[in-house]
Amino acid sequence: MTPSIAKETRLSTGFLPTLYNNTAGWDFNQAFAAGSTNLPGGSTAFVAVLNTTNLSWTANASQTALWDAAHISAIRFFFETTVAPGISNYNLGGTQIGSALGYAPVVTAAAVSEPGSLVLLAFAAVGIVVVSLRRKAVGPRTEI
């Protein structure tokens, strides 16, 4: 996430992560480059919070230089889930509020074969078995 203006303080998903496994974070080195006063590898630039509607990362109040005018740079945020990615909404807030689309987990319905296809496959399998058995009963072919 790269803010377009300084002092953005909160990033959130525009959805409640499905099958979220309580693992969320950000790139510590990128946070340092974006003004975090922690050394690279420090983990207190943001606080991740899951509530009833979304997952959010809020800048720690002690990080006064984070994403200030001199440090507008990208920070990669992540969360883990057992659901495959799709497209969903993310929100960035602070002095201004904005949103963007990005990859996010989306629950999709499992593909279910229709009964007609299954019957067709069953008949094909039976046909292959019958042809195979007839060839064995007749014996090997001989050419004259």
Image (tube, rainbow, N blue to C red):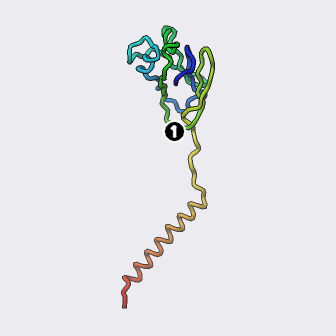
Foreground: 124 or 43? 43
Q: Residue at x 49, y 8 (%)?
A: 62
Please determine whether, in this image, residue 138 is positioned above or below residue 96.
below
> Residue 121 appears at what percent x and percent y?
53, 63
**Is 82 located above or below residue 111 in the figure?**
above
Q: Secondary structure at mark 1?
A: loop
Could you tell me residue 124's position as x and y percent? 52, 68
Report the number of discs: 1
Q: Amino acid at mark 1?
A: Ala
Residue pictured at 42% horizontal, 79% vertical: 135
27, 114: nearer the viewer: 27
Residue 99, percent from left and from top: 61, 26
Q: Choose top left, top right, bottom left or bottom right for residue 144.
A: bottom left
User: Which residue is label 1 attached to?
Assistant: 84
Residue at the far bottom in the pictured view: 144
| Quadrant of res 32 | top left
Image location of residue 140, percent across then percent down: 36, 82
Say which of 26 and 8 sits in front.
8
Give 75 or 49, whichever is nearer the viewer: 75
Q: Is residue 18 above or below residue 48?
A: below
Dot 1: few (<14), some (14–19), or many (≥20) neighbours within 10 Å? few
Residue at x 48% of width, y 27% of height? 78
Q: Residue furthest front?
A: 70
Q: Quadrant of residue 39?
A: top left
For residue 103, side relative to residue 37 (left or right): right
Residue depicted at x 56% and y 38%: 86
